[in-house]
Image: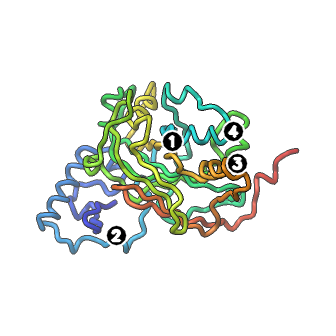
Amino acid sequence: MGLLVDGLLYEMEALHPDLPPNMSMFLNYWEDAKSMALGGQMMIAEGKISKNKGIPIESVELLAPVPFPNSCRDGYAFRQHVAAARRNRKVEMIPEFDQFPVFYFTNHHGIKGPGEILCMPDHFYKLDFELECAIVIGKHGRNIRVEHADDHIAGLMIMNDFSARRLQMEEMQLNLGPAKGKDFATSIGPWLVTPDELAPYETSPKENHFGKSWNLKMQCRINGELVSQGNLGDMDWTFAELIERASYGVDLFPGDIIGSGTVGTGCLLELNGTAKLSDPDYQERWLQEGDVIELEVEGLGVLSNTIVREEDDFSILDKKLS
């Protein structure tokens, strides 16, 4: 675990001998550990800790900021994305979206950081990205009220909820899921940014909503081509509201991840559907082997992943009974 200061990474033990060496322990002692880390940052600025102890960020391979989360929920917080997806399927906007926030549990053992995303053959049937942000819980709580929920956020990071749409759509016809279409990889990173770093970006939530919101531009590039743009400030349901809902009758623990859901235009499924409304002959685009997907969010960095095919030709789609 390290602290990023002006492009240099400092190992925790270089800042203070009592600082936890890994993120899981750091989050469990969040308040004390964060204070010590901030003290180390101040000592770097004052020259009391030499910059010679810093490691250039370009020289290391970054792992997921929270490599072993206790759980991972993903929300459905952007009305624009939900409305566009339903319009593309030629169904009315669902009124329940405006009544309460929702989320699903994804595979917390499928968390990845920057770098390669291994995909099986069936994943390549309509393989997709999802442009999102996520928060990490830094303080235990249960039945957390929305007015206190932001106090439980340790930090924010970028999230890419990789999705195999054919697997997803087939299983969801049985009114369960998404599960198999999304459990192979969810990438987060490139680092965890604490809320104090994002104070200049804070903005008001949508009308009749509560909690912090951040005006952060969001982009996705595939092989250098810009394909999606949005803003975290467009979230209708805030992270505070998602925390309140998630913690009802349930303990939230340090290290739990909660995603925002997909920003408007933030996936190929939505982009393809919108394009086909005006041009029925539009050639759908999906992720392919070798593609490099870069998600960039203002204030949070760039999360880059490369699609890699596993050396296994096993298919569960081929095992479907007729």
The residues bearing labels 4 and 2 have C-alpha atoms spaced at a distance of: 41 Å
Q: How is the image coloured?
A: rainbow
The residues bearing labels 3 and 2 have C-alpha atoms spaced at a distance of: 37 Å
Q: Secondary structure at mark 1?
A: strand
* Front residue (pair 249, 114): 114
Callout 4, which amino acid?
Met
Q: Secondary structure at mark 2?
A: helix
**Earlier along the polypeptide chain: callout 1 or callout 3?**
1
Residue at (60, 62) in percent of width and height:
118
Callout 3, which amino acid?
Leu
Q: Position of residue 95 (x, y in %)?
A: 56, 26
The residues bearing labels 1 and 3 have C-alpha atoms spaced at a distance of: 18 Å
Residue at (41, 29) in percent of width and height:
244
Neighbor class of circle 4 (other Cα within 10 Å; few <14, some 14-19, many 20+) is some
For disc 4, the marked residue is: 172
For disc 3, the marked residue is: 167
Asked whether the beta carbons under mark 1 and mark 4 sit within 8 Å of each other, the answer is no
- In the image, residue 154 sits, relative to residue 210, either above or below, namely below
Callout 2, which amino acid?
Ile
Tag on residue 57? Answer: 2
Instruction: Please identify the quadrant where the C terminus is shown.
Output: top right
Neighbor class of circle 1 (other Cα within 10 Å; few <14, some 14-19, many 20+) is many
Q: Position of residue 115 (x, y in %)?
A: 50, 65
The residues bearing labels 4 and 3 have C-alpha atoms spaced at a distance of: 9 Å
